[in-house]
Image: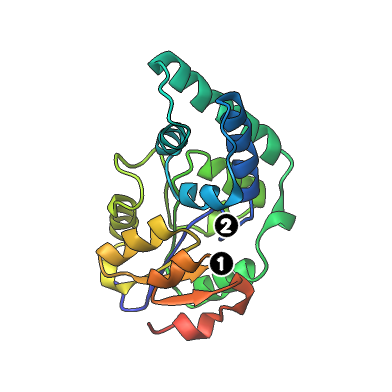
Amino acid sequence: MKNIPTFIFDLDGVITNTEQYHYEAWKEISHELEYNLTKNKNEELKGVSRDKCLLKILNWAKIKISDEKFNYLLEKKNKIYLEKISKIDSSNIVNGIYDFITAAKKHDHSIALYSSSKNANYILNKLDLHSFFDAIVDGNSVKFSKPDPEGFSLAAKLTKSNPENCVVFEDSEAGIVAGNKINMTTVGVGNSKKLNVANRVFKEFKEIKFEDFQKC
């Protein structure tokens, strides 16, 4: 096991700002269900698996649908989202991420990704960041999504790291809670008040300095 910290990143809202495309896609699906998904409610969908997001929306709309319609809407949402992100490239990397990751690799830190998205590998390739990651855990890798810590535990295992020696960068309450459950150091990135459950919070990733976490 390495003594230096392993860094585990969420994807949407941390590495790249594609969460707006998730919101737009879910808003279209919600419109089909005659429900108005607000940006405030959308905060509760961050870091949550696709099926659980739809379950939340159905609960808010107070409606029930068939399993067939449920699966149809999941597929439709993903198609809308993939169309919206089809043209992203390295210019869509959040300011500060590339410098942090390259500094971490230079100093022999392990880098992992844990995202609830099932499109994580596709997005990392579009951003030209895939090769930097020692482990990638996504929605295809786990049975239980955030706030369950399964994905973070798997990322630690794949990088041969103790959970207590991992630093998690998240923009969702669900992700922060998941990291906290197994005593990882959690760093919230964003303006949501719900991130105050993290060990540290920054409004933007560019405020984070690699040197501050080199020996957590």
For label 1, count other residues whose C-alpha is less than 10 Å away and answer few (under 14), some (14-19) or many (20+).
some
Asked if residue 69 is positioned above or below residue 30 in the image, the reply reads above
Question: What residue is drawn where x is 58% and y is 49%?
Answer: 124
> Where is residue 206 drawn, in percent x and y?
63, 74
Can you identify the residue that label 1 sits on?
190
The quadrant of the picture occupied by the N terminus is bottom left
Question: What kind of element bears circle 1?
Answer: loop
> Where is residue 21 drawn, in percent x and y?
65, 43
For label 2, count other residues whose C-alpha is less than 10 Å away and answer few (under 14), some (14-19) or many (20+).
many
**Mark 2 to mark 1: distance in Å?**
8 Å
| Residue type highlighted by circle 1 | Gly
| Residue type highlighted by circle 2 | Gly
To which quarter of the image does residue 24 belong? top right
Residue 161 at least partly seen:
no
Asked if residue 87 is positioned above or below residue 75 in the image, the reply reads below
Can you identify the residue that label 2 sits on?
13
Which residue appears farthest toward the front when viewing the image? 62
Pick whichever of labels 2 and 1 is earlier in the sequence: 2
Q: Is residue 54 left or right of residue 164?
A: right
